[in-house]
Amino acid sequence: MVDKEYKVLRAQQRSAIIAQRKALSAAEVAAHSQQVWAQVLAHPMLQAPRLIASYLSISGEIDTITLNQALQGKHQLALPVISPTERGIMDFYRYEKLEDLIPNRFNILEPKPLSHNLIAPQALEVILVPLVGFTGRGARLGMGGGYYDRMLKKISPNCLTLGLAYDFQRNDSIESQEWDVPLDEVITPTQHYHFTQKY
């Protein structure tokens, strides 16, 4: 498939799934999210304290704002901060309180990039990864900016990458490219997919 055709297909797949996600009611998001939270909190890797990179859900994604609060009781959390100068680059900074976050240029809340709160990618033990779509082989369709693909190349080989999604976000027609980094696992309301054994 030529590059232009591939980009068009990816954009179409991305738009279709995002539209389906945005069409969910608040009650549907809450119900599905609770099913995902239960599996995340019971995950074998999360029964001991971990350094976890999470994110703040937007646009109908599985609710991670409430999940983050639940995880904070046992774990140390970090959130992504988008580089203001380098396209496609982000870092993780320690996260403590929602009210301390500030909006970035995409109007997404993130921690203040204070140097003493910067987390080295190799120190992360678990990363909760946002996604638009995924396949039964662990390939991930993101938003197209490449932020997570670049970050996931920097982490420890022992770090667990865990995608959170709705069941309808599985799409086995998604084609992965050489720069795409597959996920270790994906949790949906009804399934827990394991692609790579890390524990």
Image (cartoon, rainbow, N blue to C red):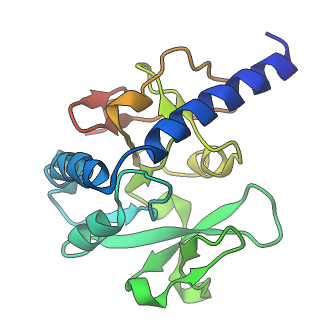
Looking at the image, how many numbered discs can be counted on the residues? 0
The residue that appears at 21% across and 50% down in the rendered structure is: 31
Res 181 quadrant in image: top right
**Which quadrant would the N terminus be assigned to in this image?**
top right
Would you say 57 lies left or right of 112 here? Answer: left
The residue that appears at 21% across and 69% down in the rendered structure is: 70
* Residue that sits furthest to the top in the current view: 1
State the residue in front, 30 or 70: 30
Residue 82 % position (x, y):
67, 67
The answer, for residue 157, to whether it is visible in the render is: no
Up the image or down, 181 lies above or below 145; here it is above
The residue that appears at 25% across and 39% down in the rendered structure is: 199
Would you say 84 lies left or right of 189 here? Answer: right
Res 180 quadrant in image: top right
Up the image or down, 100 lies above or below 118; here it is below
Would you say 2 lies left or right of 55 here? Answer: right
State the residue in front, 32 or 148: 32
The residue that appears at 37% across and 56% down in the rendered structure is: 125
State the residue in front, 113 or 27: 27
